[in-house]
Image (spheres, rainbow, N blue to C red):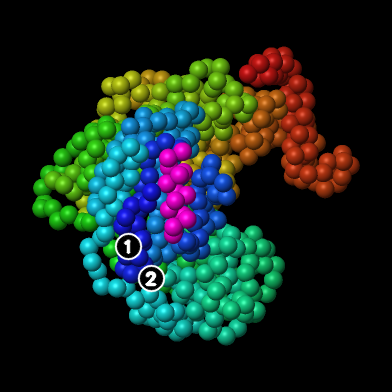
Amino acid sequence: MLPALFYACTEQLCTQGIRRLWVLSGSDGWCESCLREIREAAPGDWPVISGELPGSTPAEKARLLLGQEFRHGVFDARRGLHSEALAMLTGTLQAGSWLILLLPPESQWQTRPDEDSLRWNDGGQMIPAPHFMRHFARTLIHPAHLCRYENRPFDMTLLPPQDARQPPDGTPTPAQQQTLEQLRCAESGIFCLTAARGRGKSAVAGLFLAETPGRHLLCAPAKVSVTVIQRYLHHSQQTEFIAPDNLLTLSETADISAYGWLVIDEAAMIPLPLLTRFAAVFPRILLLTTVQGYEGTGRGFLLKFCHSLPQFTALTLTQPVRWAEHDPAEAWLDEVLLLTEPAEKITPAGECEYQALTQRALCDDPDLLAGFYGLLTAAHYRTSPLDLRRLADAPGQHFALFRNRQQVTAALWLTDEGGLSEALTQSVWAGTRRPRGNLLAQSLAAHSYFPQAAQLRSRRISRIAVHTLYRRRVLGRELLLRTADAAKNSGIDYLSVSFGYTPELAAFWTSCGFRFARTGTHPEAVSGCYTAMLLLPLTPAGQALADAAEHQFARDCAVYSPVWGFSPVPPELAESLNEREWRMLAGFAYAAKPRAVAEPALILLQKEYPVQTTELSQLLSGNLEVLKARHISGKKALLDVLRQETAGILQTLRPQWAQQTAAEIRAF
């Protein structure tokens, strides 16, 4: 039976222009019975995020809801809580909406395995999330949020009275009008309109396109995302929707002078190299994105891309349009997923205190968690609610910080890696196995020369950040020094770090004692930078690995640096293959080593044995006559032939070794 105040509370949501959270916690049958009753009594769109309820959208497809608006919504978290999907659904709900959240019985919140843990637990098994769920439970204490538990009394309460909110009448708000004026005056340039959900970004774009003469292009990762924008266009033929891949083709092959503006919605979801290409071609661009990391690169979209552009103008909207100020559902979402940066605390000058933390100690202190995670979010372009889940409950996480009283001034997050068996690491090296986790250790094993990197015990630096007001005080370096000492005392062989290469970042890490081990062969899709991987050895075994990796990296730089456009270390010009490179060739010939990884060894092979590699050289160069004569069509067919050709050369040059090595590799 519905509570007596249900209809009054629903009417209050409409009158005050707000959304409200309602948790239903109990058995499956009870939750679904309550939900049916609510939906029948409150007409609306009722999108459902669930893996079980009929007519629902799976959490992994919640992005399809972006750019749309709904009345009321349901998020089913009984089997797992997909944080980004929850944020996306909440952001689409109109004023006057209920957000119904289904949960298992309260007694199971901290003990029931969470299906979503398969995304952030590298162990590959579902695990409970007790630390996050304790944090979650704390956020429900506010009286604006309703929690109904099976077999427990429940009283629905009205919110305090507020003046009735005047709903939007379709005319721009003063802030939207100011933004439109800036765009109207622009003859060229790149404008980025950022705001949290519900601030009217899409309305500004729609109004601007509708009133601006000429032909325009509207781009987004999915056409459904621009539904709100298209409402303002009234089926106008002057604005054409185009998908990102088609836009890339257009920018490379067509005359774009016929177009006025390019508007890109959900821009943070589009890889930065594509955006860079568009920015170089189109003279007038409007980018729309949130600054919250649940729909792409988020806040880092500004950090890594926008401020590097010529003629860039930042625009923002802060006042909600879709709902009233101080909306309870938005306030709850911001608190539970830590979507907003914590308020600055004015702290006096003084010494910063160092502290190493367990997951429980960090997550059970709300202010400390908000300060620690907020500092990392502000500094790193990839931090998202998924990272919050990993930080709280994934095994093998370590944390350290400096703080001045209540202000977190520097934060460091590390993850355990390595310790794999010799047999498994050899399979990783050969490319036949790739178990989850151990990101950097496995990369060195699979895409470099060193399977032992995944056997040794290591800790990867996941995030590090120093508050802007406390930089130039060596806090970051001191954090790393103390953490390295603690790791060494725990038997860790080396620390590792990876980052999008820039000379400034490389200078910082090498000044802290880290040494280059590898750099990726292709730019990152998000940042457009090549990934650099460095090691800080802590034990003799770690030292031996770092020495060998750094020496081999210098040899590889002679091949890769023209591609990268930089050389992190002085390249070493080699004249002949060493044993690691011979083995890399065997991995390419007899296993699944990628061609890009084997490229330095393949080049040295041709250099040292030009007569024996004539055919291989023509194949590697893509000689069309040779490919046609050998009936080779397609990249896969060419790769297969290259492997066979390399295997034949190894058999000719080192027959006994080649036979023995091939047998070893095929046994992995």
Looking at the picture, which amino acid does disc 2 mark? Answer: Val
Front position among marks 2 and 1:
1
Is any atom of residue 248 visible in this view? no
Q: Is residue 406 left or right of residue 62?
A: left
- Is 14 in front, or is 175? 14
Q: In what element is the residue under mark 1? A: helix
Q: Are marks 2 and 1 in contact (CB under 8 Å)?
A: no
Looking at the picture, which amino acid does disc 1 mark? Answer: Ala
Residue 8's disc is 1
Q: Disc 2 versus disc 1: distance between alpha carbons?
A: 24 Å
Q: Is residue 230 positioned above or below 336 on the image?
A: below
Q: Position of residue 107 (x, y in %)?
A: 33, 32
Is any atom of residue 2 visible in this view? yes
Q: Is residue 311 positioned above or below 368 on the image?
A: below
Count of marks placed on residues = 2
Circle 1 Cα neighbour tier, 10 Å, few/some/many (<14 / 14–19 / ≥20):
few
Q: Residue at x 54, y 62 (%)?
A: 225
Which quarter of the rendering shows the C terminus? top right
Give yes or no for residue 654 being in the magenta stretch. Answer: no
Residue bearing mark 2: 321
Q: Residue furthest right?
A: 629
| Span colored in magenta | 29-42
Q: Is residue 466 left or right of residue 452?
A: left
Mark 2 or 1 closer to N-term? 1
Q: Residue at x 52, y 57 (%)?
A: 65
